[in-house]
């Protein structure tokens, strides 16, 4: 087993939002801190730092994960997607982001990146999820501003649009 001095920095290479990226991290550096401070991707928010609020949710190899509970050295060689990677290369919002905007699904915006990452993972897993599945996903995030009504409306609109597109 490889044992590292906690102060020793190690190179971490990954695919970030579809592009190769690398930086240096101590063995105790969290993914959230690595993304924000080493790679400059500040869209991943740090809230409770206990995995409860969901603000730091990113996708690691496609699966939603709390970046405050994972170490940067654990993502070496893996694919990490953050909220910065959701919009198109031209800056156009994806359908979920556009629906959030349309339905005022954010106020302060602190929880928004994590919600978008969890919901995008849900939509990748199930292109037209049920209201119960959306509610279950949203229920893993704390939002103190919106009351969740706009968030649910946005996600349900995207799901309905995908259902309609299938028929």
Image (spheres, helix red, strand yellow):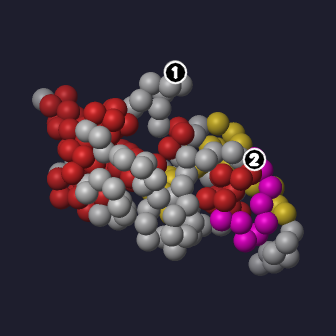
Outermost residue toward the top?
90
For disc 1, the neighbor class at 10 Å (few under 14, some 14 to 19, many from 20) is few
Total residue callouts: 2
For disc 2, the neighbor class at 10 Å (few under 14, some 14 to 19, many from 20) is some
Closest to the camera, between mark 1 and mark 2, is 1
Q: Earlier in the sequence, mark 1 or mark 2?
A: 2
Picture coordinates of residue 40 (x, y %)? 69, 45
Mark number, residue 22 = 2
Separation of residues labelled 1 and 2 (CA atoms): 24 Å
Q: Secondary structure at mark 1?
A: loop
* Vertical relation: 42 (above or below) 89: below
Q: Which residue is mark 1?
A: 90
Left-right relation of 19 to 6: left
> What residue do we see at 76% from left, 69% from top?
27
Left-right relation of 112 to 146: right
> What residue do we see at 80% from left, 55% from top?
24
Mark number, residue 164 = none
Residue 160 is covered by the magenta coloring:
no
For the magenta stretch, what is the residue range?
22-30
């Amino acid at each position: 087993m490889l044992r590292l001095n906690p102060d020793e920095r190690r190179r971490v290479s990954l695919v970030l939002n579809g592009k190769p990226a690398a930086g240096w991290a101590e063995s105790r550096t969290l993914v959230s801190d690595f993304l924000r401070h080493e790679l400059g991707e500040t869209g991943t928010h740090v809230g409770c730092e206990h995995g409860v609020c969901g603000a730091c949710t990113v996708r690691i190899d496609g699966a939603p994960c709390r970046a405050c509970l994972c170490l940067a050295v654990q993502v070496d060689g893996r694919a990490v997607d953050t909220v910065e990677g959701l919009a198109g290369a031209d800056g156009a919002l994806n359908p979920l982001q556009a629906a959030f905007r349309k339905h005022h699904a954010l106020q302060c915006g602190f929880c928004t990146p994590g919600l978008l990452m969890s919901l995008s993972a849900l939509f990748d897993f199930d292109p037209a999820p049920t209201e119960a599945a959306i509610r279950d996903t949203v229920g893993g995030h704390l939002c103190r501003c919106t009351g969740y009504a706009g968030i649910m409306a946005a996600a349900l609109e995207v799901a309905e649009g995908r259902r309609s597109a299938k028929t």
